[in-house]
Structures are given as structure tokens and as C-alpha cells.
Amino acid sequence: MISIFLCCSPRMASGMQEKQYTPSLLSFFVYNPSFGSREGEEEKKILFYHPSEVEKNEKIRNVGLCEAIVQFTRTFCPTKPAKSLHTQKNRQFFFEAEDSFWIVMVVRNPMVEKPNKDGRPPTIEYQEEEILDTVYGAVLRECYSMYKLFNGTFGRAMEAGGVELLMQKLDKFFYRYLQTLHLQSCDLLDVFGGIAFFPLDKMTYLKIQSFVNRVEESLSLIKYTAFLYNDQLIWSGLEQDDMRILYKYLTTSLFPRHSEPELAGRDSPLRPEVAGNLLHYGRFLTGPANLKDPEAKFRFPRIFVNTEDSYEELHLIVYKAMSAAVCFMISASVELTREFCEQLDGLVGPQLTLLASDICEQYNVNRRISGPDKEPQFKFIYFNHMNLAEKSTIHMRKTASVSLTSVHPDLMKILGDINCDFARVDEDEEIIVKAMTDYWVVGKKSDQRELYVILNQKNANLIEVNDGERAMDCFTTLKLSALQGVMTASV
């Protein structure tokens, strides 16, 4: 099915001098309506509330309003209560993370402040339609997934220490996490929550697989391993959903805190040998900062995986050499000692350094073969629902704190709108949108894959776009099919 739309954006067409205010977090809270069911005990329902300085009665009133909205909508659809509430100034999102445990996020709508010529106060216009439920609903669900990665489920905390322990965990985690929540940077990639895979030739991929097998055989305590290069995944032994959220943590939080000057495509480092032992560049990103420090602490963050089934608690060891990083996950019941860390450093460091150098060399070879990078006639976002693989030529940088894109925000909004249309139907679909700035936006949904393309063809008509789209489609299909082979082998 093919749909065609003409899209006019006032913000893109207007040249007025005005101030733009992006979406911002107004409040975030967790509550359970079964707690404090008696009159006068309503505060017991609230397990976490941000900002904490809000007056108690206002907290109770806001939670009570959300509870009433959810209960009211249940009368119309008992299995699907409200997910969002639209008002002029803000948007509220509701998510039942676990049975009777609700998480609510209130976002202030973006605003435009327009000056008045007669000296009157500026006029404030709220842009209610600029916020997409799919994007911020996904952000809210990810908040819970990230909490669960490091703390386990709410129910587990209740079993271990009751309401008090759960409130402590919620306060400790969300106090820090919400500070990294930059809502102005959220877009279509947050809906997908996908994984960027690093494309490799078969021989180099087999080297990495052999490396993982050797390390797991030598260090039998290791239960799962994940291998990344240049913040892109190559190998993972985790289930997809667990790897998805771990990947998000690594690439938006841990790696940026330990950024290094090494970049993909840089000349390979020297690999000198002294007394037969290879010098290496390996270091722990989690755990001891310096193995030679007698006061070094050998504590690693703990993560929870397979929470829906067997529920495993693991130590997370992240070890990096140059642009290659390996995650080793070991049962939390095992005590990790200095001797183990020294053994891991001595075994993994030299091998990972060599492997990182080989990957870098192969990357340079492939770049020379493919020729110099040219500015493409189109930009695209691709996502595969089967293996969570995503690729974007629109995003120059995407982290928790910043999203640098090479297209106008209004075009990103169009991509989100197309994605919403795709979510409403099960069959394959194609949508073509003409923006008022000579841009054509094409979205295709086929066989659990989604492709969004932005073309800049001035004065082009629909027939020319379709002709150019078919030519572009052949190139993109070839490019993505080659990439897909690596993606499929990597998951």
C-alpha cells in the first residue's frame, strides 16, 4: 500500500525571530495504588517522586489524578488503560512496569516565544503536536529497562527488603539517571532502541569468534561475552533484549565517560615485543583503574539478565584496548579477586590489542577499496525488527545527552509520523511525503524491516522521485543486504 502526503511546516517556512524552547522533564514518579488504600494514607502509594522538593499534598494530588485517569480508561478497555494524556502545556505518559507498579513521566511541551512590537509581554505558543507519543513512551519504558538492568525487578526488591528497600533503590538509581535524560535529543532511534553492528569480513569475524572461545575456555568463570568495536557490536552471547539495553548503557554512558583519542580508520599502533611479551593497551573500564595500586578496589557493577525467566545476577567486567571493548559477565555469586583480574589482564590485553589493530587495518583496506566518501544524494535510517539491527546516516552523533543530526528537526518529526502510521497496520506499506523545503521523505515497511529515506531533489515531481527512488532502492538494497549478512552472523 502506497500513501502520499504534502507536509507544510510553519516553523520551516517562517523567518520570524522567535525563541524556541525544547521539551523538558517536569516530573517523574513511581507509585502503587494498592499501597495506602485507606483515607489519609495516600502518601504511601508514592515510591519515588522527582523533583523531591515538591510539596507533599501536590505529590498526592498529581498521583491521584494519574490513578483516576488510568482507572477511568479501564472502563472502556480493561486490558489497555491510558498510555498518555495530552494537554496544552504538557504531555503525561503512563506505563505499568509490573503488576500494580506504575511509572509516570510528565513532559513540558515545546514552546515558541514570539515578541510583541507594542512592548507587551511576549506571546507563548505551546506546540502540543510536536511531541510524539511513540518516542517518549519508548523513553519511559527504557527508564524501567535500565533500572531493571542494574537493580532487578520491583518485585524482587519487595521480596528482599519490602517497600523501604524498593524506595531506596528507586531513589538511588533515578536520582542520577534522570539527570542524564535529555528529552530534546529523543527521536525515532529511541523508538527502535536498536543496535549498530560493525561490518566485518568473514576472516576477521572468525578471528574475533576464536578469541572469545579461547578466553571463555581459559577463564571458565565467564558466562557471557560481548565484543564491540568503535561503539558498534560485533559479537554477543546475551539474549537480544538484554543486549539491547546493555548496549544502550555502554554507548551512551560508560564509553563516553572513558573516551579515548583512538578512532576507527586511524593508523594501526606499533606492536613492540619486549622479552617475548607483547606490550598492550588494555585497561579496565569497570573495576580497578590500576592493577598495580595496592589499594585498588576489585568491585564491579552488577547487572540482571533473563529477568523474565531464570533471573541471573552477574558481575559486569568491561575491558578495552584501543577502540575494541569486551564485556565479560560472571555470576555474582563468585568473588572476583586481584589474582583473577591480573590473569584476565595478562590474557586478554595482548590478544585484544592485536585484534583491535587487525580490525583497524581491515577497516582501512575496505575504505581504500570503496573509494573516497562522497556526500550521498539521500540520507536514511534502517531498522530490522528481527535482530534489532539499525543504521543511520542521518545521525552524526547519538548519545544520551546529545543528538546531532544532519537534517532539520521537522524532517525528523515527519519520520516519526510515518513510523506511527506503520505501527497501526500489520501489512507492508510505503509512504511518500513532500515537505515545503524541496525535501521528499520516503518510508517503506517490508518483512519486519523499516527504511526511511530523505531525498533533496529541488523541483522534482512525484514521478521523478519514484524513478530516483527505484535507482536508490537498488543501491540501498545491495548495500544493506551486504550489511545484513554481517548483522545476522553477529547476533
Image: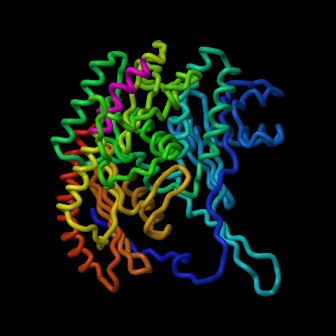
Q: Quadrant of the N terminus?
A: bottom left
Q: Is residue 34 above or below residue 15?
A: above
| Quadrant in the rendering for residue 216 | top left
Q: Percent x, y for residue 313?
A: 47, 20
Q: Nearer the viewer, residue 15 or 217?
A: 217
Q: Percent x, y for residue 437?
A: 43, 80
Q: Is residue 91 magenta?
A: no
Residue 473 visible in image: yes
Q: In the figure, is residue 11 to the left or right of 58?
A: left
Which residue is at 59% across, 48% downward? 181
Q: Nearer the viewer, residue 60 or 383?
A: 383
| Quadrant in the rendering for residue 6 | bottom left
Q: Which residues are magenta?
A: 340-354
Q: Percent x, y for residue 98?
A: 55, 29
Which residue is at 45% across, 37% downward? 245
Which residue is at 39% across, 46% downward? 231
Which residue is at 55% across, 43% downward? 140
Magenta residues: mostly which secondary structure? helix
Q: Is residue 113 above or below residue 53?
A: below
Q: Quadrant of the C terminus?
A: top left
Q: Nearer the viewer, residue 84 or 257?
A: 257
Q: Is residue 164 above or below residue 403?
A: above
Colour scheme in use: rainbow
Total label count?
0
Q: Is residue 14 above or below residue 151?
A: below
Residue 138 visible in image: no
Q: Is residue 344 magenta?
A: yes
Q: Nearer the viewer, residue 110 or 283?
A: 283
Q: Percent x, y for residue 274?
A: 31, 33
